[in-house]
Image (cartoon, helix red, strand yellow):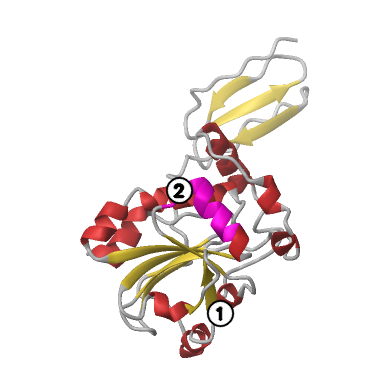
Amino acid sequence: MAISLSTALSPYTTVRFNRLTNPTPTRILPNQSPLWRPHHWNKTLKLSPRRPSHVIASAVSESPPSVSEDTKNLLDTVKVYDVNGNAIPISDLWKDRKAVVAFARHFGCVLCRKRADYLAAKKDVMDASGVALVLIGPGSVEQARTFSEQTKFKGEVYADPNHSSYEALSFVSGVLVTFTLKAGLKIIQSYMEGYRQDWKLSFERDTVSRGGWQQGGIIVAGPGKSNISYIHRDKEAGDDPDIQDILKACCS
């Protein structure tokens, strides 16, 4: 039995599958039932008119953000470490200046390396507005130093060995937000563009102890310790916000 498929079906077209004959499209009115033929086995599929699809922006990008006073107070107690091992209160990174601060999943993450380039590509715009570019990763000082050397990141790099800033900002973590179809496709795309995961960094103790399930985000903060004007919490791996939203928050 030959089977044919038509791609030019009208909004109200039924395809009748008949075990004795080839499937044939039959046009019917929206409120009209297809004719029933008792001497054949029929199944009718009604195709509704296609509705336009809408791209929905991430619901976790906020400007102005909802950052509670408790969160700001917690951040005031968090310390991060530069690539030389010097401890710095995280809020000092934006106390006297405005800064775009990116939080990586971990220092070996291929998607985070792509995000670093994605932000660094606009560093000239940030520099012109007096805005610093900072990247923080959950891991050791050694991992931060290796990341900085490997990527030649144009901004400042800091380590948060205790994940304290991630917890204070309520960034999500878990297997289900790490292994998603969209994240998988982005990893493939990143590899095709020449980015690579550093598996050695990915399987060091600081990363493995948390399973590598941590997600990050991006904030725009300062000047002033409690002044956070934009926050994006990644809802899954590779959930990059629109760069124009970041530039609007930091440089407009």
- In which quarter of the view is residue 236 placed? bottom right
Q: What is the CA distance from the residue labelled 1 to the residue labelled 2? A: 28 Å
Identity of the residue drawn at 60% across and 19% down: 5
Does the magenta-highlighted stretch encompass residue 151? yes
Q: Is residue 87 above or below residue 252?
A: below
On the image, the x and y values in percent for residue 113 come to 52, 49
**Residue 44 visible to the viewer:** yes
Q: Residues within 10 Å of mark 2 (few under 14, many from 20)?
A: few
Which label was assigned to residue 168? 1
Q: Quadrant of the N terminus?
A: top right
Asked if the stretch drawn in magenta spans residue 127, the answer is no
Quadrant (top left, top right, bottom left, bottom right) of the C terminus:
bottom left
User: Mark 2: which amino acid?
Assistant: Lys
Q: Which residues are magenta?
A: 143-153
Mark 1, residues whose alpha carbon is within 10 Å: few (<14), some, or many (≥20)? some
Residue drawn at the location 77% of the way across and 19% of the way down: 19
Residue at (36% x, 71% y) in the render: 63
Of all residues, the one furthest to the top in this rendering is 2
Disc 2 is placed on an element classified as loop
Residue 12's x, y, as percent? 50, 34
Which of 6 and 104 lies nearest the eye of the viewer?
A: 104
Q: Which residue is mark 2?
A: 152
Please report the residue visible at 61 percent of the width from the left and 60 percent of the height from the top. Answer: 142
Q: Nearer the viewer, residue 212 or 156?
A: 156
The numbered dot on residue 239 is none
Residue 163 shown left or right of residue 118 in the figure: right
| Image position of 7 with respect to 141: above or below | above
Where residue 72 sits: x, y (%)?
A: 46, 85
On the image, which quarter does residue 22 sit in? top right
Residue type at the position of mark 1 = Ala
